[in-house]
Image (cartoon, rainbow, N blue to C red):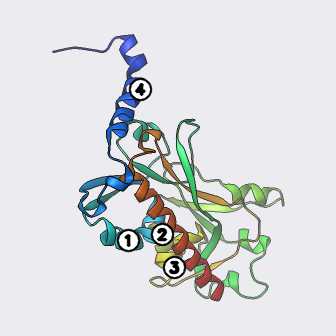
Amino acid sequence: RQLVPTPYAVEIAERVHEMVGGARTLLQPRHHDVNLATVARTVVIRASDGFVDLAAAALLTEIQHTAPMIRLLFVSKTDKEATPLRDGNIDLEIGVLGTDAPELKTRVLFTDRFVGICRRHHPLLQGKGVTAERYVSFPHIVISRGKKLRGPVDHALEEMGLQRRIIMSVPAYTSAVNIVSRSDIIGLVPLSVLAWFQAGFDISHFELPVTTPPIKVSLIWHPRLQADPVHRWLRETIVAVCRREYSRLSHEQRET
């Protein structure tokens, strides 16, 4: 009872896994043969809390209407490793592609951008408004699941000879928003995160005084599920819902 794989078994394990997955896909019925109303299946999606709050409710409505027996299981996005997709532990990932795994399939859902957040009536929003110099004069909080404190905004500020004073890091948007709403600390979040906390917290958002690269939020999956009819339908549904919800959010933010 102490069997261990040989070096050759370890070497071919991933290829065998992909072959078995491909065989399952090949033997599944074609898309037009699938009755989505009767499909009972759990789909595991790795995504950030920002995506869940932006689109999960609207996605649930679509699924309940067409495929009511499909269950979505969202898991935390603690890293961007491709191994869970390869192993079949997750079926889809939503976020910024953070791996160089060449076989993964991707599709851009929407292009996001960073915005600043602060409590309403914050001194930064008074007087001359948000300049780079005034932006860095206040303490900052960052959202990071590790020890990374610097990002694109810091690189842009450095080119102007400026630097943020980061005094706190938290792992979740909810924690950062709660702290920002009760202090003079400044935060930084993707625009899509505003979908859920704008109404419930004493928060204002503002455009950054520097230019940062756009954030490409993508749908990511393993090629063994490329032809799976249920998976393909769910991908198309997620694309439609995400683009609609982000467009709605952008429109609301322009009006405010």
Taking depth in this image into account, of 151 and 182 the one nearest to the observer is 151
Q: Position of residue 3 (x, y in %)?
A: 22, 14
- Name which quarter of the figure residue 88 lies in: top left
- The residue at which mark 1 appears reads as 62
The residues tagged by marks 2 and 4 sit, at their Cα atoms, a distance apart of 33 Å
The residues tagged by marks 3 and 1 sit, at their Cα atoms, a distance apart of 34 Å
Badge 1: few (under 14), some or many (20 or more) residues near its Cα, within 10 Å? some
Q: Is residue 216 visible?
A: yes
- Name which quarter of the figure residue 109 lies in: bottom right
- Label 3: which secondary element: loop
Disc count in the image?
Answer: 4
Q: Amino acid type of disc 3?
A: Ser
- The residue at which mark 4 appears reads as 14
Badge 2: few (under 14), some or many (20 or more) residues near its Cα, within 10 Å? many
- Give the label on residue 138, or none: none
Is 26 positioned to the left or the right of 80 in the image? left
The residues tagged by marks 4 and 3 sit, at their Cα atoms, a distance apart of 48 Å
Q: Position of residue 171 (x, y in %)?
A: 47, 58
Which callout, 1 or 4, points to the residue nearer the camera? 1
- The residue at which mark 3 appears reads as 181
Q: Position of residue 71 (x, y in %)?
A: 28, 60
Q: Are marks 1 and 2 in contact (CB under 8 Å)?
A: yes
Question: Who comes first in sequence, dot 3 or dot 2?
Answer: 3
Q: Residue at x 32, y 43 (%)?
A: 28
Question: Who comes first in sequence, dot 1 or dot 2?
Answer: 1
- The residue at which mark 2 appears reads as 241
Q: Furthest-front residue in view?
A: 32
Q: Are marks 3 and 1 in contact (CB under 8 Å)?
A: no
Q: Amino acid type of disc 1?
A: Glu
Quarter of the figure with the N terminus? top left
